[in-house]
Amino acid sequence: MPAEANGQETYSMSKPIGLYPGTFDPLTMGHVDIIERAVKFVDGLVIGVAVNRDKGPLFSLEERVAMVRHEMDRIEKQSGVKITVTPFENLLMQFAEEIGASIIIRGLRAVSDFEYEFQMVGMNQALNDDIETVFLMADARYQSIASRLVKEIARLGGDISSFAPDHVADALRKKYS
Ligand code: ADP
């Protein structure tokens, strides 16, 4: 709401708590880019690492959480925004309510992401219409990166150094050595 100050309209906007959920198996430069954009408009960010047994993750939950946490120290310092990395197994909207998040952050890559996200938002709105989903696009350099492809390239011995942070690339090389 605009407030009158010295005849000029000023806007005071309190920032929300954001929740960025995903599998992060493993964290890529695409995820990092989305997180760096998200911290510009949230007061605090929770990265929800989904247990996701169905997907049969390559990295354990503990490993995925540790990889995300490792990278967050730098972003926290640069942005001044508190970032919490938390595993979750319950329904996304329940988790968002539990942590007091009012926005869910998702990254959009190609049209292929759209249909799935479109359905998810529809269902999530039906569960809790007060929590908004916000879509961000990564820098053009990172838009095509997907954890699945990074794992595939690493498995076949390709160079993944531009797709994942150094410590993640090292962990991938170790997994496949
Ligand atoms: P999920 O298993 O839900 O797809 P991911 O760990 O793959 O979770 O991704 C979490 C979120 O990050 C999703 O919203 C996904 O679209 C987004 N994301 C992943 N890679 C990129 C990328 N290269 N550019 C933009 N968004 C991305």
Image (cartoon, helix red, strand yellow):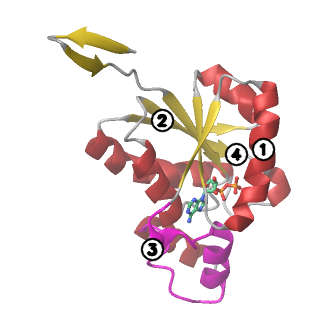
Magenta stretch in the rendered image: 138-165
In whole angstroms, how far apart are the C-alphas of marks 2 and 3? Answer: 24 Å
In whole angstroms, how far apart are the C-alphas of marks 1 and 4? Answer: 15 Å
Q: In the rendering, at what x and y percent does residue 97 appear? A: 66, 22
Q: Nearer the viewer, residue 79 or 7?
A: 7
Q: Earlier in the sequence, mark 4 or mark 2?
A: 2
Pointer 3: residues within 10 angstroms few (<14), some, or many (20+)?
A: few
Q: Residue at x 72, y 24 (%)?
A: 129
Query: Residue 103, can we see it?
Result: yes
Q: Which mark is residue 120?
A: 1
Q: Residue at x 48, y 26 (%)?
A: 16
Q: Earlier in the sequence, mark 2 or mark 3?
A: 2
Q: Which residue is mark 2?
A: 45
Q: In the rendering, at what x and y percent does residue 72 appear? A: 41, 47
Residue 102 colored in magenta in the image: no
What quarter of the picture does the C terminus occupy? Answer: bottom right
Q: Is residue 129 left or right of residue 173?
A: right
In whole angstroms, how far apart are the C-alphas of marks 4 and 2? Answer: 15 Å
Q: Which residue is mark 4?
A: 50
Query: Residue 90, can we see it?
Result: no
Q: Residue at x 51, y 55 (%)?
A: 67
Q: Earlier in the sequence, mark 3 or mark 1?
A: 1
Q: Earlier in the sequence, mark 3 or mark 4?
A: 4
